[in-house]
Amino acid sequence: MTSFITFALLFFLFSLNPTSSSPAKRNSYVQNACSVTHYQDLCVQTLSPFSSVAKNSPSKWARAGVSVAISDNKDLLRYLLKTRRSAFGKRDRVALSDCRELLQDSLDNLHKSLAVLRSLRASEFQRQMSDLGTWLSTALTDKDTCLDGFENTSTKSSTVRKLQEKVTTSMYLSSNSLALLNKLVANGL
C-alpha cells in the first residue's frame, strides 16, 4: 500500500510540471542551437544550462549566448585588473593597456546587445538585428585586436600566453553569440 501511495504521489508531482524535459531532449535543444556556431563544443558546454528555458527559441538562445559572453568578458577584465604589470615587458604593458580598453568596449557592446535582445519588437526587428550585428561584430573585433597587440612581442611569458588563451576563448564565445544572432535573423521572431 505504501509503494502505491509513493507511486501515486510521484506521478502527481511529475504531472504538475509538464514543461520539464528529459536530459536527452534538453541536450537536443542545445545541440540544435549550437549547430550554427564555429565552436560547437564550447557552445554546448557553456549554453547547456539554458536548455530547459530556451528550448527551440532562437531569441532565447541568442540572449543566452550574449549572457555567457558578458560573464566571460567580465571575468577576463577582472583577470586583467589582477594581473601584475611587472609580469609584462614594456611593449606588452602597452598591449595590456590597449587590451583593457578594448575589452571594456567589447563589454559595453555586449551589454547593449543584451538590452535589445530583451526587448525585441516585430515592428523594429530589422533595425534591431542590424544594430545587434554591428555591436556583436565590434565586440568580436575588439578581442581580436587585443590579441594582435601581443603578436609582435619578443618574449612570450607564461602570463602573456595565459592571457592570450583567455582572450581567445572569450573571442570564441563572442563568435558563437554572433552565430546565434544570425540564426535569429534567419528564423525571425
Image (cartoon, rainbow, N blue to C red):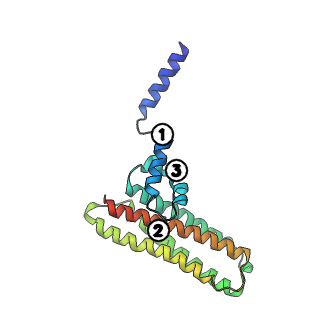
Distance CA(mark 3)–CA(mark 2): 20 Å
Q: Residue at x 44, y 71 (%)?
A: 136
The image position of residue 125, as x and y in percent, is 29, 65
Callout 1 touching callout 3 (CB < 8 Å)? no
The image position of residue 145, as x and y in percent, is 54, 80
- Callout 1, which amino acid? Ser
Q: Mark 1 or mark 2: name the one nearer the start of the chain.
A: 1
Against 158, is 26 above or below? above
Against 94, is 20 above or below? above
The image position of residue 162, as x and y in percent, is 68, 71
- Residue hosting label 2: 110
Q: Is residue 43 left or right of residue 117?
A: right
Residue count near mark 1 (Cα–Cα under 10 Å), binned few <14, some 14–19, many ≥20:
few
User: Which mark lies nearer to you, 3 or 2?
Assistant: 3
- Callout 2, which amino acid? Leu
- Residue 77 in view in this figure: no
Distance CA(mark 1)–CA(mark 3): 13 Å
- Residue hosting label 1: 22
- Residue hosting label 3: 49
Q: Is residue 36 left or right of residue 148?
A: left
